[in-house]
Structures are given as structure tokens and as C-alpha cells.
Image (tube, coloured by chain):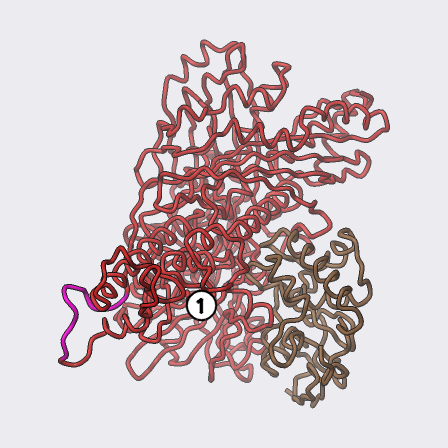
Amino acid sequence: MTKIAIEIVVNGEPRYCSVEARMTFADCLRHELGLTGTHLGCEHGVCGACTVLVDGASVRSCLMLAVQADKADVRTIEGVADKDGRLHPLQEAFRRNHGLQCGYCTPGMIMTLLEFLAENPAPTEAQVRDAISGNICRCTGYQRIVAAALDAAEELRAAGSAQPVDTPAAKRVGVSA
Amino acid sequence: MNADAVSHASVIGAAIPRIEDGALLVGKGHYIDDIPMPGVLHVAVVRSTVAHALIRRIDTEAARLVAGVHAILTIEELLPALADGRMPLGGGTSDKRDINTPFVLAKGEVAYVGEAVAIVVAEGRYIAEDAAARVEIDYDLLDVVHDAREALLPDSPKVRRELASNVLNTFNVGYGDVAAAFAAAAHVVRDELWQHRGCGQSIEGRGVLAEPRPADGGLCVWSSTQMPNALFNMLAQMLGMDDTRLRVITPDVGGGFGPKYCIYPEEIAVAAAARLLSRPLKWIEDRRETFISSVQERDQYWTVEVAVDAEARILGIRGRLLHDQGAYAPKPVNLPYNSATAMTGPYIVPAYAMEVVIALTNKVPVSSVRGAGYPQAAFAMERMMDLVASQLGLDRAEVRRRNLIPPSKMPYAKPMKARSGAGMVYDSGDYPASQAEVLAAAGWNDFPARKAKALEQGRYIGIGMANAVKGTGRGPFESGTVNVSASGQVSVFTGAAAMGQGLATALAQICGSELGVAPEQIHVIAGDTATSPLGLGGFASRQLVTAGSSVHLAAKAVASKAKRLAAHIMEVDEDQLELNDGRVRVRGGNNSVSLGELARILRGAPGYGFPGDIEPGLSSAQYWRTDALAYANACHVVEVAVDIEVCDVTIERYVAIHDSGRLVNPMIVDGQITGGIVHGIGNALYELMGYDDTAQPITTTLAEYLLPTATEVPHIETLYRETVSPANPLGVKGVGEAGTIPAAAAIISAIEDALSPFSIRISNTPLTPEMLFDTIAAARSRGLSASP
């Protein structure tokens, strides 16, 4: 089958690959680029496990074709902690609040919440629940994910502008978080 | 954590963050589909599209022509690599197979939509699926059994042609003189209940990766399973291979919830095909396959009568339980036995008789989903307690209080047997105190006034409650090995299977508390048959109790050995020594020796001397044995608001108390309980695995089968009591399923209370908006007004 060359900036790094037109972006990330942190739960756009940020906006990578990501600036879970491995405050908050059990939905939850907290740095509990209502978690009952999001929001507010929540990945390279 | 601060008191009982989390938070977990495997080929499964048919012909010619296809295998092609085309009964004490175990691939007949018929092996998954769509199967349709009640009718078709009857088994559970109890009763209440549990729906589906190792004829199999050792045993038998060349590993598992407790045909077929083709093969279940091939816990139909005296004290219970088993029984059918033996729950029931009938249907096979028969038992019992209360005009909590087993009667023997054959002995707990505490926290006594006020404003609010008891820590044992290597690295090996519960952290806390080592410095290797050849795995809320106890004993043995050797080296008495910070120290002095140095001595050196009467190796393997269970208890109180026009139910408040024995990590416990409750909310209101009259599944996406999302779920308030269990060395009880068990009963109780102006009785779960609408409409047509 014909392959199409695409070029994507992923977590600040330019990446090149050659994919069939029908390949989903999720499969491209996972199997062509080796970024297996993005998970597939349903492959029909309901569970949200495969959520990544494309040009700063959350996207279900199972419902997007890889060729549609050509020239896009993409951020995945692998690009959330800083380069020397220090966790992002949202990741720290998940850990502190036990916001994950099996961890399978976690990358999608974090990518969804990164976008949300950038738009709404001081959310209410109800707003957080609404924000993650498109991400299914079977383990936690959501309670500790919600707690983590509220905790992270507070941390990020306290840190002020020194801690950009959701700068698109390419621009974020070189920024000391 | 400051390693100096590590002590028994600080580590067990501490709500420390999990040691698992670091990798999972940054996308570095290793789930089954993340394992790099050069040269791997991909498998797609061709499944039956009809619920019951003869297979006249399988035409694979068009499929074979798809570029990139390596093989298409039906049972005929796979048989040379198999001891038998039929799976042995999983999880039993023998390898026997019978006419109810599934086939590795269908053999001439299919008995449910989703049954595996052939596998396609190709360069990539997309190609494999292209080819699978081109496999043509000619079916001769046969009559279908789509309902367990119809399966029992004399003229019912048979689920499979090999069956003489659709009844898989019948048995009776009970004790005491039930007839006399009913004869003496002041009141008898009766009801019929229908219950449905749905699917496990871990967000990661099942999956298997098999790597043949041609150099030595070996095979390494990774599977997203709760049962690595059971899979090892079944593979060894089914592949007829030298089991010293076989290894099964569980990678990170993205949730279990019961369905991964079974060993599946795909795990055998993929491993056999990998050996036939001498290539690594991988199959990853997609979500549609979850709905049509992973076990479900489906329908139970209960008919129950309860006899009480004039004071609402239970005299006896009798009834019949019909259990829908689906098309096959991959394991011994334990669920209805769990249900029947668990029904009397936390109450004193002097006489009990439950007739159990297990019927086969042309649907996906049934085995456990979180709770495993217990939620149905709690639902049946708790709904009957509400019925007693309403018929006698008593408060629902008061009726329960009068019947709860008091703490003075602990340990309390129910005159029934657990699966192990041991008596059912409730080891500990104070059920009346649990109930009283949660009722007070939830404002139970104030509720009628609030309800009346809401009703004046046209709002229908209700409160409900349910108690539960869960036997946890099923034996006979779980392995736990603690080893200190010469580098000083402390490792724990166990046959228990991690699937997201925080097992590694809990075991590291238990081990670390004995050795004076911080939990995050301990490696926990769970579910690898090369390092834990003996093990049972993850089921029945058992792993903290069983693996925890073994690790506790192993760590104690290692600590004792380390002290003995250190005393010998440092020429001091053992009782002067303590372990902390990875060293054995003389209490109050500077002299110390590291665990690593002790391990180096105990690994020996060629031909050199060896200390005294100490066994080689700074390690200990323990298999703490148990047949008894540690019984956890819970009481949940729920407030709901029902919109009677659109029949939407909002859970406005949820307060739960759990007595789960000693808590090793309260944060992990709370995560388990809360997650379990939300599973129960799904069971109560949303989750229905639907089939039409031809047994075609009609909910095969997560848009049709509804899981609770964050906006349906309230903030859940949890309370804990810690009655130390005398049933194990740690004093713990399991927590994986307890949250789920009373949830649906409490929620339905609250909805019924909210709708009390309509005099509605609700005897089923799930209660979907459509069902609620029909129920309210029927009440209205009976002329019952909606006014208070």
C-alpha cells in the first residue's frame, strides 16, 4: 500500500515517518515513533485514553489519521515531565493524591487536564469533573483524579507564570519549567 | 522518605505514594502492547457472527491472497500443536476437560457471537484485519437460547448439539429447619429479583505475546492476565511442552476486574501458532472483542421468601437462584455458589434453603466480575430487608440492627462451607457499630424531615442503605520470597498478580517494615513464573492477605537470619541488634554491617569457609497457608434525587464505612474502596450488556454500554474501622471488591425511597432511565398520585 511521508514535531523534536493513509495517529505514535505512553482503550473515540495535544488542543489520536498530523506540533505524555525527568506539577499531584491505579487511562487524563488547566487555572470540582467526563477510568472512581487536578491547579497558581502549564511543545523546549 | 525513619510503625499504615507510579506517570509503563519484539507478527481473530450454527465450510482462500498474510489457522491447522482442541477446566485442581469447557477454536459448531473460529497471522494488525474480513464462513443456523429462563423450558433448543440438557448443574445450599421457620412466622415477604452485572471493562483489554525460542525449544509468553501461573500450567499441558522451557510473564496490566481471571482460547491459540510458525506472535483484544469474548457476569433471577417474627427478626429464608452461565464454563462455576452462600451476609438467619440452577445460553461465557456473585447476594438480601421494613412499617435501619450479628458472637460460624471445604467463620468485626457510625455520619435520622420538605417543593429525594460482608484472602496460599542480593538490593518475588491495585507498594511496605528498608528502594517482581514458579494470582480480594502474609513471614525470616549472622560477625548478642537503613546495627552503638555485606557472605566463596549453622543465601521463600477467609464488612448510605419526568437519578451524597482490618496503606485502600463503589454505581444505573432475541449482542461499544464517567459520580465520603483480623499474621482483610458489593443495593433502596409517593418496588439492577420511566408510568396508570 502506498505510503505517505509526514513530518511532525513531537515533544519538541522533529520526527519523520512514512505511513499508510489509513493509519491512525495513535498507531503512528505508538508503533512508528515508539511513543507507547499514549494508550488505546476503545479505538472508537469514547474512552479518551489516547488523548494527545495537537497544536495545543486535546485530540483523540485514535480518531485522527496520522497524515492529518503532518506539520503539526504534538505533545504526548512522554513530553510532560521536563527533560531531566522532573515530573510536571500535574504528574506530581497525581502521585501525591493517588490519582492512578492501573495507569492505563492516566496519560489521556493528564493530557486532557493540561489543556483544561491552561484554560481554567482556578477550576471548581464540578468543572474538573466536566473536563474529564470524556475520559473513562475504571479503577479510581475519578475521585482522586479530581483531587489531583484541583491540587495541581493550586500548585500551578502558587508557582505563578514561572510554570507555564500548556505551552505548545515546540515553544516549550528550552523553557526552564 | 528518610530511610532512617523507617520502622515498623511508620511503614505499615502509612499513606505513602506508590512505588509503581513513577513510570506510569511519564508514559514508561510496559503494558502488553508496548513490549518491543523484533520480527513480531500480528494476529486478528475471526469470530462467529451468529449465536448458534453449524460451520459448514471455512473458505480462507481470498484471505490468504492478501499481501502480508503469513497464515490462517483453524482448529484443523492448530491441532498438531495442541494436546487437545478443547480447553481444560481452568482453575480446578485437575486438568480435566468436559463438554462445557470452551474450544481453542470452534470445531464444527459455534455457540455464541464472538466465539473464535480462526486466527489470521500477518505482517501488521491492519493487514490481519483486512484478511480476517475476507475469511468466509458458511453457517447452518441453529435455534438459539437467549434467556436463562427459556433454557429450562422442556421444548427449548439446546445451546450446543452435544448437550442433553441446558442445565449445567443444580445444587442446594442451606441449613436449619426452614419449613418450621416459615410455619412459625408472623410475616412472610416474597419477591422476585433480576440482576445483571455487566462486563469488567478494564480500559486495557486482554492481550498475549508469544515468543518461541528456537535455540532451546523454549517459549516465553506475556499475557495481560490475573493468573500467570495458571496460564503457565495450562500452556504446558496444552502445548505438551517441557515446562522447564516455558515462562509466563505479566507485564503492567491495565486493569483486571475479574475477566482476566480466566485463561482464554486466544492465549492458547496464539502460543500454539507461534510454535507452529516459529515466529513471535501478538494478539491485542480490541474493545468490540471485549464485549463479545471476555467473560461477563450476566443474569441471575432470584425468587426469595423471608420469614420474620412479629419484631422483624428473621426466622428463615428460602428461594431459588437461576444463574445464566452463557455458552461455556471456562472454570468451575463458583459464582452462584458464592451468591448462595453469601446471601445471609451480616445477619443472623436461623434457617436457610437456596436452590441453585445453572443454565447455559448462547451468550458469552460467564465468570467473575469484581464482586463475583457477592453483589447479587447483597442485593437480594438487602432488598428483602427493605421489604420487611416497609411491610411491617419499621425503619429500614432498625430492621437491620435487630438482625445483625453482634460483636459478642464473633467469631461467628455460618453453618455453610466455603469453597475450600472449610467452615464459613466470620473472624471479626462489629457490624452494628459500623452501621450506627455511618448512619450518624450520613444524617439518616434527619432525612425524613428533609425529604418531606423537598417533596413540598416537588423534588423527589430518597435515602437508602445496604450492609455487606465479603470473605477475602482466598487460599490455599500465595508465594512470597524476600531476597537480599550482594549489592544490598532487597527484592520481593510473588505469584500474586499486579493489575493496578498497588500490590508492589503494599508488599514493599510489609517487607520494608521488617528489614528497615524504605519501600521505594525495594524491587517487587510479581507474576513471572521464572522467579515465582508457585503461585495462584489475583482474584477474590486475596493478595494483600495471602501474598502479604507470606512476604511478612519471609521478611521476618530474612531479618532474623541477618541478625544471627551479624551477631556472629560482630560478636554481640542478637538481641542487641536492630535493622534500619539497610544495615544491622548494634543498638545505641556505632558498629553495623550492611545487608549487602551479609548477603555476600551468605552467597559463599569457592572452597572457603562458611559461617556456623546458617543456611546459604540471605533470602526466604514462604507459602503462608490458609483455607479460612478474613471477612471484611461495609455499610453504605446513599442519597439520591430522582427527576420523575426524564427519570434521571442523581446521587447527591454517598457515605460508606468499611472495616477492612488493619490498613497497610490507607490511601491505596481508599482508592480501592472508592473505585469499587463506582463500579457498583455502574451496576446500579448504567451497565447493561444487551442481547436481542437471537442472542446478538447490541452493546458492543462504550457509547452503547455505559460506564460511569466523572460527572455521574458524586464525591464519595469514606469512613474506616480497623478491626484487626485474627485470621492472618498481618491482621488484614482484602479491599478489592468490598466497595462494589453493597453499592447497587443501597442506590436502588434510595431510589425506591425517593419514589415512595408512588409505592414503587424496584427489584432489579441495572435500573436504566427507560426502566424507571416504565415503572413510574405503570404506577401512575394504577392511579397512584405523585403527591405526598
Q: Chain of mark 1?
A: B
The picture places residue B232, in percent across and down from the top left corner, at 34, 64
Residue type beneath disc 1: Gln
The number of callouts visible is: 1
Location of residue B189 with respect to B745 vertically, above or below: above
Residue B609 in magenta stretch: yes
Q: Is residue B705 visible?
A: no
**Range covered by the magenta-colored residues:** B608-618
**Residue tagged 1:** B521
Q: Which chain is red?
A: B
Q: Nearer the viewer, residue A123 or B33?
A: A123
Residue B611 in magenta stretch: yes
Q: Is residue B769 visible?
A: yes
Query: Which residue is painted at 50% across and 53% down in the image?
Result: B14
The picture places residue B100, in percent across and down from the top left corner, at 38, 49
Q: Quadrant of residue A82?
A: bottom right
Query: Which residue is painted at 43% across and 14% down in the image?
Result: B181
Q: Nearer the viewer, residue A110 or B175?
A: A110
Q: Quadrant of residue B753?
A: top right
Query: Which residue is painted at 72% across and 74% down in the image?
Result: A64
- Left or right, B230 with respect to A91, comes to left
- Left or right, B709 with respect to B435, comes to right
The picture places residue A30, in percent across and down from the top left corner, at 60, 77
Please tell me whether the stretch drawn in magenta is mainly helix, strand or loop.
Answer: loop
Q: Nearer the viewer, residue A56 or B761?
A: A56
Location of residue B174 with respect to B646 vertically, above or below: above
The picture places residue B527, in percent across and down from the top left corner, at 39, 63
Query: Which residue is painted at 46% across and 14% down in the image?
Result: B182
Shown colour of chain A: brown
- Left or right, B22 with respect to B422, comes to right
Q: Nearer the viewer, residue B357 or A96?
A: A96
Crowd around label 1: few <14 · some 14–19 · many ≥20 (10 Å) = some
